[in-house]
């Protein structure tokens, strides 16, 4: 029985990483750290996607104003994700609904699909908890923030 990543012959294989973001963007450093680590992973040619669950959905809310909290607003950094090849951002529908949010409340992040004549595609996909569970099961590495 080989475990993923345990055998030396798989060292060169691209692994699927999912960064799971469960916390609100402000009030702690978890969201910013999750974003930075995801960018590093993508820079090393891993297959990186991100999931936003629970209060993590607030990280992608449009029009964030951090002036009251005194924290740096790093939400513009999400615009750069596609430059690093991170084009799959999954948002759990139930988490949005529980917080009175919908897909329309999220940042309109897009990427240029090179396989499809560089047409713009949405990076953010709202999925239900069952779809998200299936996506999580496909990953080699899960990191929670």
Image: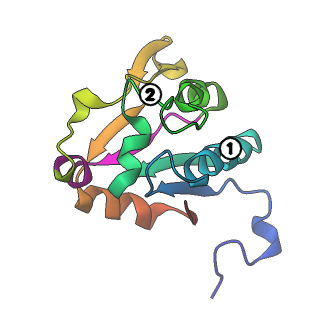
Q: The residue tagged with tag 1: helix, strand or loop? A: helix
Q: Upstream in the sequence, badge 2 or badge 1?
A: 1
Judging by the rendered image, the residue that carries numbered circle 1 is 36
Q: Nearer the viewer, mark 2 or mark 1?
A: 2
Q: Nearer the viewer, residue 84 or 35?
A: 35
Percent across and percent down for residue 30 are 58, 55
Quarter of the rendering occupied by the N terminus:
bottom right
Quarter of the rendering occupied by the C terminus:
bottom right
Residue at 33% across / 64% down in the picture? 133
Q: Nearer the viewer, residue 74 or 90?
A: 74
Q: How many marks?
A: 2
Percent across and percent down for residue 91 are 34, 46
Answer whether residue 53 is visible to the viewer in this image.
Answer: no
81 falls in the magenta region:
no
Tell me which corner region of the image, top left, top right, bottom left or bottom right, holds residue 8: bottom right
Residue at 58% across / 31% down in the picture? 81
Percent across and percent down for residue 33 are 65, 50
Judging by the rendered image, the residue that carries numbered circle 2 is 65
Tell me which corner region of the image, top left, top right, bottom left or bottom right, holds residue 11: bottom right
Residue at 52% across / 46% down in the picture? 49
Tell me the distance, in whole angstroms, between the alpha carbons under discs 2 and 1.
20 Å
Q: Over which residues does the magenta segment extend?
A: 86-97
Left or right placement of residue 35 versus residue 125 in this view: right
Image: 48 above or below 85? below
Q: Residues within 10 Å of mark 2 (few under 14, many from 20)?
A: few
Left or right placement of residue 52 versus residue 28 in this view: left
Left or right placement of residue 62 versus residue 88 in this view: left
């Amino acid at each position: 029985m080989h475990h993923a990543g345990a055998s030396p012959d798989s060292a060169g294989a691209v692994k699927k990483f999912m960064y799971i973001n469960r916390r609100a963007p402000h009030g702690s450093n978890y969201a910013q750290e999750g974003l930075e680590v995801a960018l590093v992973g993508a820079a090393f040619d891993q297959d990186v996607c991100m999931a936003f669950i629970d209060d993590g959905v607030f990280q992608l809310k449009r029009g964030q104003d951090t002036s009251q909290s005194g924290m740096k607003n790093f939400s513009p950094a999400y615009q750069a994700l596609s430059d690093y090849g991170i084009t799959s951002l999954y948002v759990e529908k139930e988490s949005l609904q529980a917080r009175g949010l919908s897909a329309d409340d999220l940042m309109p992040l897009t990427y240029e699909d090179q396989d499809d004549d560089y047409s713009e595609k949405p990076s953010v996909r709202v999925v239900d908890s069952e779809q998200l569970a299936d996506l999580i099961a496909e990953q080699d590495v899960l990191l929670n923030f």
